[in-house]
C-alpha cells in the first residue's frame, strides 16, 4: 500500500498514529550507543552513536500532545528510558542501550512500543523495537 493510500485508510478509520517493527544496531570500537526516539514532531528516529536518523512518521492525525506511549521491556536491559508507564508525547521520548566495556557481552533490549489516544485511551498501534549495542 502506498504511503498516501495508507494515510487515507488510517484517517478514515480514526487512526492517528502508527508504528512498525524496528531494529537499531551499533557495533564497533569505543563505547557504542543504540537508541529509539519518538519525537513531538511526529517522526521516529534511531540513534547510532551521536547520529539520529529518521525511521518513519508515527503521527498521522492531530497533535503529538493528543497521544501517549508505553514501552514494555520484554528482554534485556536499557541504559535509559522509562518502561511500564504511559508517557505523554507532548515531550519527545527516548530509550537507549550503551555498551562501554569490551567484554563480549553486548547491551541489548527488546521492547514492545505502544501508542494510544490520550483522551479515549484506545491503543492506535504497537511494534517490536530491538536495540543492540556492542563494543568490540
Image (tube, helix red, strand yellow):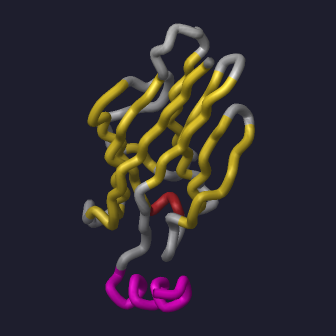
Q: Is residue 101 left or right of residue 111?
A: right
Q: Is residue 4 magenta?
A: yes
**Residue 48 sits in quarter:** top right
- Residue 111, quarter of the rendered image: top left
Q: Position of residue 74 (x, y in %)?
A: 27, 36
Up-down relation of residue 134 to residue 3 (above or below): above
| Identity of the residue furthest to the right in this view | 51
The answer to whether 12 is drawn above or below residue 73 in the figure is below
Whether residue 20 appears in magenta in the rendering, the answer is: no
Residue located 40% across and 44% down the image: 87
Q: Residue 64 or 83: which is nearer the viewer?
A: 83
* Boundaries of the magenta span: 1-14
Q: Is residue 129 left or right of residue 58?
A: left
Task: Indicate whether 26 appears above or below 98.
Answer: below
Which residue corresponds to the image point at 43% horizontal and 28% vertical from the top-left?
108
Q: Nearer the viewer, residue 8 or 105?
A: 105
- Could you tell me what secondary structure mostly forms the magenta stretch? helix
> Residue at point 73% right, 34% down?
50
Residue at image point 30% right, 39% down: 72
Q: Is residue 87 left or right of residue 38?
A: left
Placement of the N terminus among the 4 image quadrants: bottom left
Instruction: Relative to 63, say whether 65 is above or below.
Output: above
Residue 23 percent coordinates (x, y): 48, 47
Q: Residue 98: percent from the left, percent from the top? A: 56, 22
**Disc count in the image?**
0
Q: Quadrant of the C terminus?
A: top right
Q: Please provide percent x and percent y for residue 95.
A: 50, 35
Amino acid at each position: 500500500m502506498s504511503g498516501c493510500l495508507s494515510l487515507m485508510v488510517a484517517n478514515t478509520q480514526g487512526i492517528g498514529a502508527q508504528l512498525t517493527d524496528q531494529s537499531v544496531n551499533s557495533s564497533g570500537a569505543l563505547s557504542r550507543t543504540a537508541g529509539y526516539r519518538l519525537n513531538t514532531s511526529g517522526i521516529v528516529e534511531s540513534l547510532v552513536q551521536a547520529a539520529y536518523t529518521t525511521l518513519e512518521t508515527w503521527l498521522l492525525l492531530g497533535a503529538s500532545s493528543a497521544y501517549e506511549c508505553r514501552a514494555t521491556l520484554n528482554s534485556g536491559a536499557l541504559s535509559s528510558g522509562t518502561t511500564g508507564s504511559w508517557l505523554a508525547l507532548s515531550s519527545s521520548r527516548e530509550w537507549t542501550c550503551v555498551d562501554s566495556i569490551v567484554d563480549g557481552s553486548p547491551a541489548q533490549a527488546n521492547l514492545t512500543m505502544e501508542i494510544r489516544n490520550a483522551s479515549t485511551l484506545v491503543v492506535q498501534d504497537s511494534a517490536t523495537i530491538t536495540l543492540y549495542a556492542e563494543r568490540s
